Image: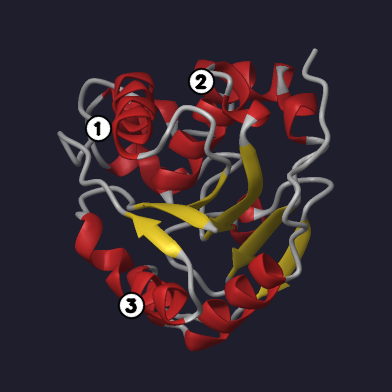
Amino acid sequence: MRVVLVHGFLDRAGIMSGLARHLKSCGHDCVAPSLQPCDARHGLIPLAHQLDQSIQESLPDDARFALVGFSMGALLCRYCLQELGGHRRVEAFFSIAAPQAGTLTAYLYPGQGCRDMRPGSQFLRDLERTKDRLSMIPTTCYWSPVDPVILPSKSAQLPGASQVRVFSPLHPVITFDRRIYRDVGRRLKAQPTTGTQYAPP
Protein backbone atom coordinates (compact mmCIF):
# COMPACT_ATOMS: atom_id res chain seq x y z
CA MET A 1 0.00 0.00 0.00
CA ARG A 2 1.08 3.57 -0.53
CA VAL A 3 1.66 5.41 2.75
CA VAL A 4 2.09 9.15 3.28
CA LEU A 5 3.99 10.07 6.46
CA VAL A 6 3.68 13.60 7.83
CA HIS A 7 6.11 15.16 10.30
CA GLY A 8 5.29 17.39 13.23
CA PHE A 9 5.99 20.89 14.51
CA LEU A 10 9.61 22.09 13.99
CA ASP A 11 10.39 18.76 12.29
CA ARG A 12 11.36 17.59 8.83
CA ALA A 13 10.51 14.41 6.93
CA GLY A 14 13.58 12.71 8.42
CA ILE A 15 11.86 12.17 11.75
CA MET A 16 9.59 9.67 10.00
CA SER A 17 12.47 7.79 8.36
CA GLY A 18 12.53 4.90 10.84
CA LEU A 19 8.87 4.15 10.32
CA ALA A 20 9.29 4.60 6.58
CA ARG A 21 12.12 2.04 6.50
CA HIS A 22 10.06 -0.45 8.48
CA LEU A 23 7.04 -0.06 6.23
CA LYS A 24 9.16 -0.34 3.09
CA SER A 25 10.59 -3.59 4.45
CA CYS A 26 6.98 -4.79 4.70
CA GLY A 27 6.39 -4.01 1.04
CA HIS A 28 4.73 -0.58 1.30
CA ASP A 29 5.62 2.47 -0.77
CA CYS A 30 6.25 5.53 1.41
CA VAL A 31 6.15 9.25 0.71
CA ALA A 32 7.32 11.70 3.39
CA PRO A 33 7.18 15.38 2.39
CA SER A 34 8.92 18.17 4.32
CA LEU A 35 6.44 20.99 4.79
CA GLN A 36 7.47 24.63 5.14
CA PRO A 37 7.60 26.62 7.31
CA CYS A 38 7.92 23.83 9.85
CA ASP A 39 6.86 26.13 12.71
CA ALA A 40 3.49 26.68 10.97
CA ARG A 41 3.78 30.40 11.60
CA HIS A 42 1.12 31.13 8.98
CA GLY A 43 -1.29 28.53 10.31
CA LEU A 44 -2.13 24.87 9.83
CA ILE A 45 -4.44 25.37 6.87
CA PRO A 46 -1.71 26.52 4.43
CA LEU A 47 0.42 23.56 5.48
CA ALA A 48 -2.52 21.20 4.95
CA HIS A 49 -2.95 22.55 1.42
CA GLN A 50 0.78 22.08 0.89
CA LEU A 51 0.43 18.47 2.05
CA ASP A 52 -2.51 17.93 -0.28
CA GLN A 53 -0.51 19.33 -3.19
CA SER A 54 2.41 17.04 -2.35
CA ILE A 55 0.08 14.04 -2.35
CA GLN A 56 -1.34 15.04 -5.73
CA GLU A 57 2.16 15.35 -7.17
CA SER A 58 3.46 12.11 -5.65
CA LEU A 59 0.55 9.71 -6.17
CA PRO A 60 -1.65 8.91 -9.16
CA ASP A 61 -5.06 10.58 -9.07
CA ASP A 62 -6.89 7.30 -8.47
CA ALA A 63 -4.40 5.85 -5.98
CA ARG A 64 -5.66 4.91 -2.56
CA PHE A 65 -3.30 5.32 0.38
CA ALA A 66 -2.86 5.47 4.13
CA LEU A 67 -1.99 8.57 6.14
CA VAL A 68 0.33 8.62 9.14
CA GLY A 69 0.76 11.88 11.02
CA PHE A 70 3.00 12.70 13.98
CA SER A 71 1.89 15.47 16.35
CA MET A 72 0.96 18.56 14.31
CA GLY A 73 1.22 16.41 11.18
CA ALA A 74 -1.82 14.38 12.24
CA LEU A 75 -3.89 17.58 12.38
CA LEU A 76 -2.75 18.40 8.85
CA CYS A 77 -3.82 14.90 7.84
CA ARG A 78 -7.23 15.42 9.40
CA TYR A 79 -7.72 18.66 7.51
CA CYS A 80 -6.83 16.91 4.25
CA LEU A 81 -9.20 14.07 5.10
CA GLN A 82 -12.13 16.15 6.29
CA GLU A 83 -11.86 19.39 4.31
CA LEU A 84 -9.93 18.62 1.12
CA GLY A 85 -11.62 15.41 0.00
CA GLY A 86 -9.02 12.97 1.28
CA HIS A 87 -11.72 10.84 2.94
CA ARG A 88 -12.64 9.58 -0.53
CA ARG A 89 -9.20 8.01 -1.11
CA VAL A 90 -7.67 7.15 2.24
CA GLU A 91 -7.68 3.54 3.44
CA ALA A 92 -6.46 4.16 7.00
CA PHE A 93 -5.36 7.02 9.25
CA PHE A 94 -2.77 6.78 12.02
CA SER A 95 -2.33 9.61 14.53
CA ILE A 96 0.86 9.55 16.61
CA ALA A 97 1.01 11.77 19.72
CA ALA A 98 -1.15 14.47 18.18
CA PRO A 99 -3.04 17.31 19.91
CA GLN A 100 -6.38 16.22 18.49
CA ALA A 101 -8.21 18.26 21.16
CA GLY A 102 -5.44 20.84 21.44
CA THR A 103 -2.56 21.14 23.87
CA LEU A 104 -1.75 23.68 26.56
CA THR A 105 1.89 23.80 25.45
CA ALA A 106 0.74 25.56 22.25
CA TYR A 107 0.48 28.72 24.37
CA LEU A 108 4.27 28.72 24.73
CA TYR A 109 5.11 29.53 21.10
CA PRO A 110 3.93 32.39 18.85
CA GLY A 111 2.42 32.05 15.40
CA GLN A 112 -0.92 31.09 13.91
CA GLY A 113 -0.06 27.39 13.82
CA CYS A 114 0.29 27.22 17.59
CA ARG A 115 -2.89 29.24 18.00
CA ASP A 116 -4.58 26.60 15.83
CA MET A 117 -3.33 23.89 18.20
CA ARG A 118 -4.68 25.48 21.36
CA PRO A 119 -7.75 23.88 22.99
CA GLY A 120 -10.96 25.35 21.59
CA SER A 121 -9.32 27.02 18.59
CA GLN A 122 -11.36 27.84 15.53
CA PHE A 123 -9.32 25.31 13.55
CA LEU A 124 -10.19 22.50 15.97
CA ARG A 125 -13.85 23.57 16.14
CA ASP A 126 -14.05 23.39 12.35
CA LEU A 127 -12.60 19.86 12.38
CA GLU A 128 -15.08 18.87 15.04
CA ARG A 129 -17.96 19.92 12.77
CA THR A 130 -16.84 17.60 9.96
CA LYS A 131 -15.59 14.70 12.09
CA ASP A 132 -18.20 12.36 10.58
CA ARG A 133 -16.06 12.18 7.45
CA LEU A 134 -13.64 10.05 9.46
CA SER A 135 -16.32 7.61 10.54
CA MET A 136 -15.69 5.04 7.78
CA ILE A 137 -11.89 5.33 7.83
CA PRO A 138 -10.06 2.94 10.17
CA THR A 139 -8.30 5.31 12.58
CA THR A 140 -5.68 4.52 15.21
CA CYS A 141 -4.37 6.95 17.84
CA TYR A 142 -1.05 6.30 19.57
CA TRP A 143 -0.66 8.31 22.75
CA SER A 144 1.53 8.48 25.84
CA PRO A 145 0.17 9.31 29.30
CA VAL A 146 3.55 10.88 30.16
CA ASP A 147 3.98 12.98 27.01
CA PRO A 148 5.19 16.41 28.21
CA VAL A 149 4.04 18.16 25.02
CA ILE A 150 0.47 16.91 24.65
CA LEU A 151 -1.34 18.31 27.69
CA PRO A 152 -3.63 16.91 28.82
CA SER A 153 -2.37 13.59 27.46
CA LYS A 154 -5.84 12.35 26.52
CA SER A 155 -6.04 15.18 23.99
CA ALA A 156 -4.20 12.76 21.70
CA GLN A 157 -7.24 10.48 21.51
CA LEU A 158 -10.00 10.68 18.92
CA PRO A 159 -13.46 9.36 19.81
CA GLY A 160 -14.27 6.24 17.81
CA ALA A 161 -10.65 5.47 17.00
CA SER A 162 -8.57 2.55 18.21
CA GLN A 163 -6.52 3.87 21.13
CA VAL A 164 -3.01 2.48 21.65
CA ARG A 165 -1.19 3.65 24.78
CA VAL A 166 2.60 3.82 24.54
CA PHE A 167 4.76 5.01 27.41
CA SER A 168 7.13 7.57 25.92
CA PRO A 169 8.48 10.29 28.25
CA LEU A 170 9.82 12.46 25.41
CA HIS A 171 7.53 13.68 22.65
CA PRO A 172 9.73 13.08 19.56
CA VAL A 173 11.04 9.75 20.86
CA ILE A 174 7.65 8.15 20.20
CA THR A 175 8.41 8.32 16.47
CA PHE A 176 11.20 5.77 17.04
CA ASP A 177 9.07 3.30 18.99
CA ARG A 178 9.21 -0.07 17.27
CA ARG A 179 5.99 -1.14 18.93
CA ILE A 180 4.28 1.52 16.85
CA TYR A 181 6.16 0.43 13.72
CA ARG A 182 4.96 -3.14 14.17
CA ASP A 183 1.40 -2.12 15.00
CA VAL A 184 1.08 0.17 11.98
CA GLY A 185 2.49 -2.59 9.77
CA ARG A 186 0.09 -5.15 11.21
CA ARG A 187 -2.93 -2.90 10.72
CA LEU A 188 -1.95 -2.04 7.15
CA LYS A 189 -1.53 -5.73 6.35
CA ALA A 190 -5.06 -6.35 7.65
CA GLN A 191 -6.55 -3.69 5.37
CA PRO A 192 -8.67 -5.02 2.48
CA THR A 193 -7.05 -4.58 -0.91
CA THR A 194 -10.25 -3.50 -2.63
CA GLY A 195 -10.51 -0.17 -0.84
CA THR A 196 -12.92 1.24 1.68
CA GLN A 197 -16.47 1.47 0.45
CA TYR A 198 -17.53 4.95 1.45
CA ALA A 199 -20.04 7.40 0.06
CA PRO A 200 -18.95 10.85 1.25
CA PRO A 201 -21.62 13.32 2.40
Q: Amino acid at mark 1?
A: Ala
All told, the count of numbered labels is 3
Residue in view at x 23 percent, y 27 percent = 111
Camera sees residue 140: yes
Instruction: Give residue 39's quadrant in the image.
Output: top left
Instruction: Give residue 184's quadrant in the image.
Output: bottom right
Coordinates of residue 58 in the picture (x, y in percent): 31, 39
Residue in view at x 30 percent, y 53 percent = 32
Q: Amino acid at mark 2?
A: Phe
Residue indicated by mark 3 = 18
Cα–Cα span, label 1 and label 2? 13 Å
Numbered badge on residue 123: 2
Q: Check the picture and name the quadrant holding the N terminus.
A: bottom right
Please indicate whether residue 161 sits to the left or right of residue 92 in the image: right
Label 1 element class: loop
Cα–Cα span, label 2 and label 3? 30 Å
Q: Amino acid at mark 3?
A: Gly
Residue indicated by mark 1 = 40
The first of marks 1 and 2 along the sequence is 1
Residue in view at x 23 percent, y 20 percent = 42
Residue in view at x 60 percent, y 66 percent = 143
Label 2 element class: helix
The first of marks 3 and 1 along the sequence is 3
| Crowd band around label 3 with a 10 angstrom C-alpha radius: few (<14), some (14–19), many (20+) | some
Q: Is residue 87 above or below residue 68?
A: above
Residue at the extreme left of the image, as rendered: 37
| Crowd band around label 2 with a 10 angstrom C-alpha radius: few (<14), some (14–19), many (20+) | many
The residue lying toward the viewer, choosing from 115 and 126, is 126
Cα–Cα span, label 3 and label 1? 24 Å
| Crowd band around label 1 with a 10 angstrom C-alpha radius: few (<14), some (14–19), many (20+) | many
Camera sees residue 170: no
